[in-house]
Structures are given as structure tokens and as C-alpha cells.
């Protein structure tokens, strides 16, 4: 599903490599943690996968396509297959919960009937039934991130990318969100989570890719954070 | 899909206008003020042009014929004038006709002169040209012609008039161009602020897989609407002001100020201001979002 070969990323000419010689393969339905301290290259890797950035070296294939060579007008179609979850939620705060979730469907051209049918189901899956008409600003941080997850999964993407999804949440709520992502994974969606939350990584015992200073220094099945740090 | 997308875009345009109403009012206001200034200037310029054109049309050349010129010389002069490429009309006015006009102009004041005294007036050719400015060259050409006593065309006054019209035209064009550029600058910067306020929204749209056109359409329509309203309002204001001014001119019997009719001015203005407003709005809103689409 994702294949990196000698992948490298340099932000500007003469600047240090943000990622260097990265090699990995992620299969369908996997649950993978990208771990490492701030500046290790986790976010850069995420941005490369959704082609917010273009690799400067090597090859990165997502859904069997070389994203480095993907023409700009094809980007929306790549992103429709990837649900994004962000640390800062990135929701439209002045709109309601259902509007935020439906938005991802409208953008991809779903019919009104389809939207009406699917949104309540997803909201109930993330535990937000009864909050459909609530404004984002009236929700707690945990609830906002649930909306973020609902928006990410509403189009049934093949993959979820979560960049520090628990970074702004207290430990209890963070665990709830991770459980939610785990459920999504069990339903057949590949989930990639960039985090430096040690507890979460150790608790879930999933595949862990360790990044340090732009290099991939470890790749373990059922890994734990403490192995490297 | 298409209908759903269309409903979304129209809804989003109206929502966007409502949610960002203060910024939209500001942007529309900026379009309105700049176009009002531009329109006001255009009104003045159109009327100055109209008045000077009217004055120019009255410019004609009168070629006075020497008292002792024989018939053949006069006929030759007449032929030379009407054959000239700049000349559109030549009319011969005899000494008697001149006297008749004078008597008409002065009314009863010339009574008594009509019989006993000899007519002191000279016969003439009254010459019209296609281009009023050609009379200056034409006059100097015919001054030395056989049988010509004098050529009159309002020397000095006509040259000043032509120089003035040229200055008015050049200054007018320069000022209008300046105002139009200022309008583009002001509008694009004001709309850039609305786009900046919605940067987050645009970024989210990009992440969930919206195409650039899907994102651009609501901004495009918003810009179009703001530009249109920003152009129509000054038209209304100018319509009102022009009507008041024309009434004031009529009331004060300043008939020498020959204004263009209201409808003609407003339709001429609409022809420029409405497309300009719409283009300003669209350019302002779509140009300023290019940076945010590159996510």
C-alpha cells in the first residue's frame, strides 16, 4: 500500500536532509506507529504521503502510484482515499458537527441522500450521536477529535493518516481516540499514526517505525517506544 | 453529483457572504467608493468632451472676397475651396445677403442705411471642414489666394480651444487609468483579507480532496457579486446626483452648459463600470487565493 525506497526530503538547496534514505513497506490493513522526537521527520513523512510535499530523493509509492510523479490535478483523488486526522483537529469551528463531517462527502460529490444516510451512522460509531447539530466550539477537545475521525472515515478511505492525534488531549481522552482508530483499523482500514506518546505506543503493541534525525532507525512488529528511546 | 455540487457552491457562496458579512461589506464598499470616484470623473470628462465637441463643431472658416475681384477669380476660388480634401461644405454669401443678416441681427437699428448708402460689406465663402482643427492650416493656405481679402476663423481662440481639449483628454485618461489601478490594488488587498480569514477552511478543503475549482467557485461567485453590487450602487448614486445637477442647471438657466442627457451618461457609465466592478471582484478574490491552493 505504501512503499518507500531510498526516500529523501530536503526542504531547500544546501539545507540538511529532513528525511534520508528511508525504506519501508506498509501493507493493507496494517496499524503502524511512526515514532520519534520532535524534528525526527514524522510530519515530513506524513506530508510526503499525502503529497503536500514532493520527495526530493528516492521513490514513494502510495496505492501503487509514484506520488512524486503524480500530476497536481490528480492530488484531490489521492487525498480522497486518505483520511487525515490532525493534532489541532482542523475543523470548521463555526459550523455544526454534521456539517463538518458531511463536508468531506460534499467535496467528493456524494448525493444528498447518501450524505443523510451515512453521516448519522458514522457519528454514532465515533460516539457523537445526539451531537450532530452541536457547534464545534461547544465540544470538548476529545469530542472535537472524534469529529475529526468521523470526517476522516466518512468516505471510507483505504487509509487513515493521523498526525499526533492525541497531542492536545488528556491521557484518558487520548486512549479513547486511539481505541477509536483501532476499531477503524479492525474494520479494514490501514491506520498510520505519527506520535511521541510513549504510553499509547507501548499499550497497543503494533508495528513501530522509529525515526531519528531524519533516518529510519528501527522497524518492529509489536514494538514498544522504549526500545530505542 | 453535478447538481449537488452546484447547490453546495451556491449555498456556500451565500453562506460565505453572510459569515464574512463585515469583510464583504468592506470589500463591496471599497469597490463602490473607487468606482464612484471613477464614475464621477467619467461624468465630468464625458461632459467636458461633449461641450468642447459642440464648440468645435461651430468652428468654421470665412473667406472674404476682395471687392474688385472679377467673376472668374471668385469662381476659381470657390472651386479650389470645394475641391480641397479637408473641406466638407462651401457656401457663397453675397454682399447683399451679408447686409440682410446684419439687418436681421441689429433689427431696426440700420433703418435708413438700406437705400442711400453703398453696401460696405464683402462677399464671402463660409467653409466647413471634416476636422475642425484643419481650419488653422486651411486658413494660411487660402490667405494668399488670388481674390482673397481676408480669412477669418477665430484665430487665437480656436488654437487655445484645441490645446485645452487635448489637455483635458490626456489628463482625463491619465486620471481614470490611475483610479482604475488604485481600484484593482485596493480591492485585491481587501479581498485578500477575506481569503486570509478563510485560509483554514481552504486548507481543510484541500485535505479532504476538494479540487481547486471546487474551492475557487464560491470565492469566484462572491467576488462577482461584490463587484456587481459595488458597481451598481455608484451608478444609482451618480444617476441621482446627475439628475439633481441637471435640474439645478435648468433652474438657473445656465443653458450654455450643454449637458449630455441623463440616460446617455448612465448607460455609457454602466457600460464601463459594471464589467469593471465584476472583473475587479473576480480578480480580487481569485488572484488572492492562489497561494492557499498550493497545499
Image (tube, rainbow, N blue to C red):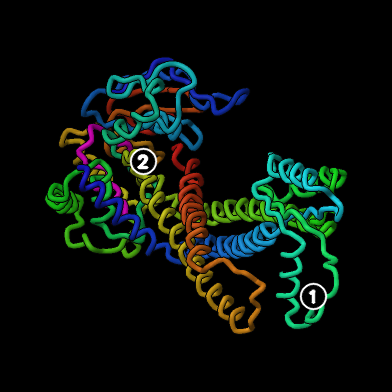
Judged by depth in the image, the label closer to the viewer, 2 or 1, is: 1
Q: Nearer the viewer, residue B292 or A33?
A: B292
Relative side of B15 to B280, left or right: left
Quarter of the image containing the N terminus of chain A? top left
Residue ID at (17%, 36%): A186
Can residue B124 be seen?
Answer: yes
Which of the labelled discs sits on residue B213, or is there none?
2
Q: Is residue A159 magenta?
A: yes
Please name the residue shown 70% across and 54% down the image: B92
Q: Which residues are magenta?
A: A142-164
Look at the numbered disc 2 and give the secondary structure of its residue: helix
* Residue tagged 1: B115
Please name the residue shown 85% across and 57% down the image. B156
Residue B201 lies in the magenta-colored region? no
* Residue B58 percent location from the top left of the image: 69, 60
The chain that hosts pointer 1 is B
Helix, strand or loop at label 1? It is loop
Amino acid at each position: 500500500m505504501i512503499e518507500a525506497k531510498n526516500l529523501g526530503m530536503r526542504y531547500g538547496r544546501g539545507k540538511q536532509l529532513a528525511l534520508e534514505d528511508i525504506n519501508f513497506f506498509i501493507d493493507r490493513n496494517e496499524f503502524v506507529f511512526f515514532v520519534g522526537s520532535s524534528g525526527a521527520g514524522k510530519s515530513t513523512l506524513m506530508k510526503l504521503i499525502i503529497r503536500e510535499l514532493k520527495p526530493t530523493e528516492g521513490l514513494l509509492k502510495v496505492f501503487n502510484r509514484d506520488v512524486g510523479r503524480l500530476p497536481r490535478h490528480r492530488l484531490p483523488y489521492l487525498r480522497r482515499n486518505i483520511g487525515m486526522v490532525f493534532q489541532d483537529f482542523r475543523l470548521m469551528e463555526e459550523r455544526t458537527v454534521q456539517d463538518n463531517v458531511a463536508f468531506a462527502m460534499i467535496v467528493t460529490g456524494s448525493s444528498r441522500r447518501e450524505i443523510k444516510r451515512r453521516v448519522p451512522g458514522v457519528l454514532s460509531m465515533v460516539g457523537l450521536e445526539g451531537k450532530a447539530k452541536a457547534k464545534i466550539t461547544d465540544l470538548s477537545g476529545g469530542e472535537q477529535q472524534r469529529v475529526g475521525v468521523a470526517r476522516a472515515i466518512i468516505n471510507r478511505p483505504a487509509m487513515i493518516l493521523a498526525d499526533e492525534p492525541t497531542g492536545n488531549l488528556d491521557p484518558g481522552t487520548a486512549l479513547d481516540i486511539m481505541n477509536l482508530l483501532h476499531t477503524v483499523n479492525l474494520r479494514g482500514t490501514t491506520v498510520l499514526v505519527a506520535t511521541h506518546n510513549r504510553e499509547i505506543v507501548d499499550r497497543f503493541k503494533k508495528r513501530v517505525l522509529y525515526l531519528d534525525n531524519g533516518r529510519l532507525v528501527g522497524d518492529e512488529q509489536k514494538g514498544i517506544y522504549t526500545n530505542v528511546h | 453529483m453535478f447538481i449537488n455540487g452546484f447547490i453546495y457552491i451556491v449555498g456556500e457562496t451565500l453562506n460565505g457572504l453572510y459569515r464574512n458579512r463585515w469583510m464583504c461589506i468592506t470589500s463591496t464598499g471599497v469597490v463602490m467608493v473607487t468606482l464612484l470616484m471613477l464614475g464621477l470623473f467619467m461624468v465630468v470628462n464625458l461632459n467636458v468632451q461633449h461641450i468642447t465637441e459642440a464648440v468645435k463643431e461651430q468652428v468654421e472658416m470665412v473667406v472674404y472676397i476682395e471687392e474688385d475681384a472679377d467673376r472668374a477669380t471668385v469662381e476659381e476660388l470657390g472651386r479650389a475651396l470645394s475641391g480641397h480634401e479637408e473641406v466638407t461644405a462651401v457656401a457663397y454669401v453675397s454682399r447683399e445677403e451679408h447686409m440682410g443678416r446684419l439687418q436681421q441681427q441689429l433689427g431696426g437699428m440700420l433703418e435708413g442705411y438700406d437705400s442711400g448708402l453703398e453696401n460696405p460689406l464683402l462677399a464671402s465663402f463660409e467653409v466647413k471642414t471634416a476636422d475642425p482643427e484643419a481650419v488653422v492650416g486651411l486658413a494660411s493656405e487660402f490667405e494668399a489666394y488670388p481674390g482673397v481679402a481676408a480669412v477669418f476663423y477665430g484665430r487665437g481662440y480656436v488654437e487655445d480651444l484645441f490645446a485645452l481639449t487635448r489637455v483635458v483628454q490626456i489628463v482625463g485618461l491619465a486620471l481614470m487609468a490611475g483610479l482604475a489601478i488604485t481600484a484593482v490594488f485596493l480591492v485585491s488587498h481587501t479581498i485578500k483579507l477575506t481569503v486570509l480569514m478563510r485560509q483554514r477552511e481552504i486548507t481543510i478543503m484541500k485535505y479532504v480532496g476538494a479540487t481547486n475549482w471546487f474551492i475557487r467557485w464560491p470565492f469566484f461567485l462572491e467576488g462577482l457579486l461584490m463587484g456587481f453590487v459595488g458597481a451598481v450602487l455608484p451608478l444609482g448614486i451618480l444617476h441621482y446626483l446627475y439628475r439633481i445637477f441637471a435640474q439645478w442647471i435648468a433652474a438657473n438657466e445656465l443653458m450654455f452648459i450643454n449637458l449630455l442627457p441623463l440616460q446617455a451618461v448612465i448607460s455609457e457609465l454602466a457600460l464601463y463600470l459594471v464589467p469593471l466592478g465584476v472583473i475587479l471582484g473576480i480578480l480580487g478574490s481569485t488572484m488572492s487565493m492562489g497561494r492557499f491552493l498550493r497545499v
